[in-house]
Amino acid sequence: MKKISTLDDLKKAGDKGLKSLFPGSVKIVVGMATSGIASGAREVYEALSAEIKKRKLPYILTGTGSMGMDFIEPLVDVIEKDKPRLSYGKMTIDKVPQLIDQIVKGTIDKIKPIYRVDEEDIIAKKEKKQYLKGALPEYLREIPAMYDIPFYKKQVKIATRNCGIIDPENIEEYIARGGYLAAQKALTSLSPESIVEDVIKSGLRGRGGGGFLTGVKWQSCVAAKGDIKYVICNGDEGDPGAYMDRSVMEGDPHSVLEGMIIGAYAIGAQEGYIYVRNEYPLAVANLTKAISDARSRGLLGKNIFGSNFNFDLKIGKGAGAFVCGESTALMASLEGKAGEPRAKYVHTVEHGLWDRPTNLNNVETWANVPVIVARSGKWFSEIGVPHSTGTKVFSLVGKINNIGLVEVPMGIPLKDIIYDIGGGIPGGKKFKAVQTGGPSGGCIPAKMMDLSVDFDALWEAGSMMGSGGMIVMDEKTCMVDLARYFIEFLASESCGKCTPCREGVRRMNDILHDICAGHGQEGDVEMLESMAQGIVDGSLCALGGSAPNPVLSTIKYFREEYDAHIKQKHCPAGVCRALIRYEIAAKKCTGCGVCAKKCPSECISGEKKKAHKIDQKKCIKCGICMESCKFDAITVK
C-alpha cells in the first residue's frame, strides 16, 4: 500500500474509497456485525455470493457494520448507479433469489425495502453531498427516506457515523467519509495546546461511565511529569445488555484509531493500547486489520503526515472480568497483573500504566474526537444540553419493540427513546421502568418519562449514564428480583480486594435472595439501605461505590413491591416462584389436557372436556402449563 504523508495523498485515497462506496455497478452490502451474524447474516451473505456467481452477474458483494436496527436483522443494502441506497430487513436465504430478480428487473417486486438513503453526510468535506442524479424513479417514491422513519428521525449520528455505511476492513472507504482529515489537520496545523482547548470547549464528557470532562483529563495528563506517556482505549464493556463500543469497534475501527492519534499528539504520548474483552472476536479482528492498514499507509508509526510525530498502537485482550472496566484494574491487567483496582487518590493521569502518566478514554469518546477537531468544539457544544453536550449511544434492549443501537442528542426526553425510537412495549403491555448505566445503574420509573437523558438528570434521579446500556422493563418485571439479579452479578464480579464491596455486596445479595424466596423480615429494607451507604463510603473503586444503585433506586421508586414480598409474602409481578401459585380458571378451561401432558411434575389432573385442577403440593411453579394453554385459563396468583 502507498504511504499517505500529505493532504493530496489522503485525497487520492479518498477518491478510491468513494469509488468503492459508490462503484457505478450494482453493490450489495450485508450487515455483518455480531448482531447480524447472530440473526443469520453469514448464511445470507453466502447465499447472495452463490446466486451472483450462478447468474454470472457483475455485482459487488461486501460487508458492513451495524446500522443499529437489530430488530430487523439480517439487513441487506442495495446500491445502484443514480439510485438511492435501499435497505431490506429480515432477509433470509429463501428471499435471496427474489431480491436478485428485483435488482435485475429494476423494479420492486416481492420484497419491499424498509427505507432508502438519498444523501450521505460526509464529515469534514461538505455538510451534505448529493450523489443521486435526476428524479427519483416512480416505483421508489413510496419508500421512506432513512431519517423519515421513526427509528432514525430523532437520532444524530456522530460516534456511529460510519457504522453500517462503510466496509470496516476498507481504510479507503473510511477516508472517503472524511477519515484521517482531522488527524492531518491536527498534526500539521494545530498545536497540542489548541487541540486540548477545543476539546474542553466542546464539553465532551467521558462516555465510559464516569462522565469526567475529556479535555480536562487530557490537560491533567499534559501537565503530569514524565517523558513517557500513554493513551489507552477502554473497549472492555462488561455491562449486561451493552454493546455500544463493540458496534463501533466492529463497524468503524479507524474512527477509534484516528481519535487516539489526535489524543496522543495533544498529550505527548507515542504509544497506545486498545484493551478489548476477548469475547469480542470480531472487534479484535477488525481492529487488528485497521491497525495493520493504518501502519502500512504511514498513519501509524514514525513521522505521521511528515510532522515528526511518532505513534503506534497495540491491542491488549481482557479475560472478561467486569472489574477490568475500571481504569486502574484495566491498567493492572495490561501489565500482566491481577485485575484489581487501587485507591483513587493516585491519579492515572500522573501514575498510570507502568507508573507513567496515562490517559484512558472509552471507545465512544475516542470516536467523537476526530469530528470535534474537524468541525470545532463549538459545533459539538451546541448539540445536546449544557453540561451534557453532544450525543450518546445507547443499546436499547429488554421489553421493547425496536431492540437496537441508537445515538441521540443529550437531553432527549426518555419517552422519546422508549416510544418514538423504541416503538413502545411489546404485546400492548405497560412500560414500568428502564434501567440505565449497567448493573451499577439505577431504575427510572414510568412516572419519570419526561426525564431529560443527560449526565446530571440521571444522577439526580438515582441512576447514571454509565457506558450506555438501557434495559426496558414492562409490568411483568419484578423490581425486587431485578435488584437481586444485578446485585448477584456484581457480587460474583467483585475482585474481593476491599472488604466493603467483597462482604457488603455479598450480604446484600443474601438478603435479596431471602426476600424473593419468601423469607424476608421486617427491617430488611432498612438494613439494605444502611449497608448500601457503608459500601458507597468504604469501597476502593467505582464498582463498589455504585453497586448499591439498583437496590436503592428500586427501594426509592418501588418500595411497595418490597413490602408486598416481606409483609404479604406476595410477588405482585408474579415472578418470584416461592411467592406465587398457578391456578386454573374453571370457566375458561376446556379440558383439552395439553397442560397435564406437558407438566413435568404431573401435578395437573382432570377429566377430558372438564375443568382441570393443579395440586399445589406437587407444583414446581415452572410455568409450562401457562405457556402451553391456548385459552388463557391458567393465571398466576
Image (cartoon, grey):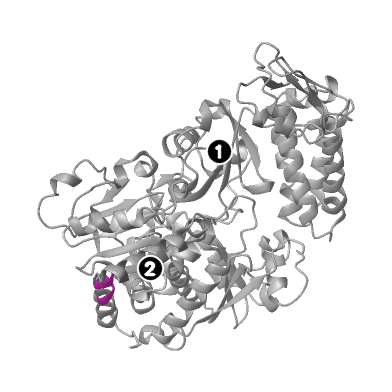
Instruction: Decide which of 464, 570 is in the foreground and name it.
Output: 570
Report the residue that reaches farthest toward the front. 608
Q: Is residue 505 left or right of residue 189?
A: right
Q: Quadrant of the N terminus?
A: bottom left
Relative image position of residue 247 (x, y in whole percent) = 49, 59
Secondary structure at numbered mark 2: loop
The nearer-to-camera label among 1 and 2 is: 2
Q: Which mark is residue 477?
A: none
Up-down relation of residue 116 to residue 142 (above or below): below
Residue 372 shows in the view = no
Secondary structure at numbered mark 1: helix
Up-down relation of residue 256 to residue 101 (above or below): below
Instruction: Decide which of 611, 288 is in the foreground and name it.
Output: 611
Residue 118 shows in the view = yes
Write down the quadrant of residue 131 in the picture. Answer: bottom left
Residue drawn at x 23%, y 70% as measured from the top left: 23
Relative image position of residue 77 (x, y in whole percent) = 32, 57
Query: Where does label 1 land, which residue?
Result: 457
Q: Which residues are magenta?
A: 16-20
Q: Is residue 17 magenta?
A: yes
Query: Where does label 2 land, which residue?
Result: 167
Instruction: Decide which of 296, 610 is in the foreground and name it.
Output: 610
Instruction: Decide which of 2, 123 is in the foreground and name it.
Output: 2
Q: Main secondary structure of the magenta part?
A: helix
Which amino acid, by three-letter code, is at mark 1? Ala
First along the sequence among labels 1 and 2: 2
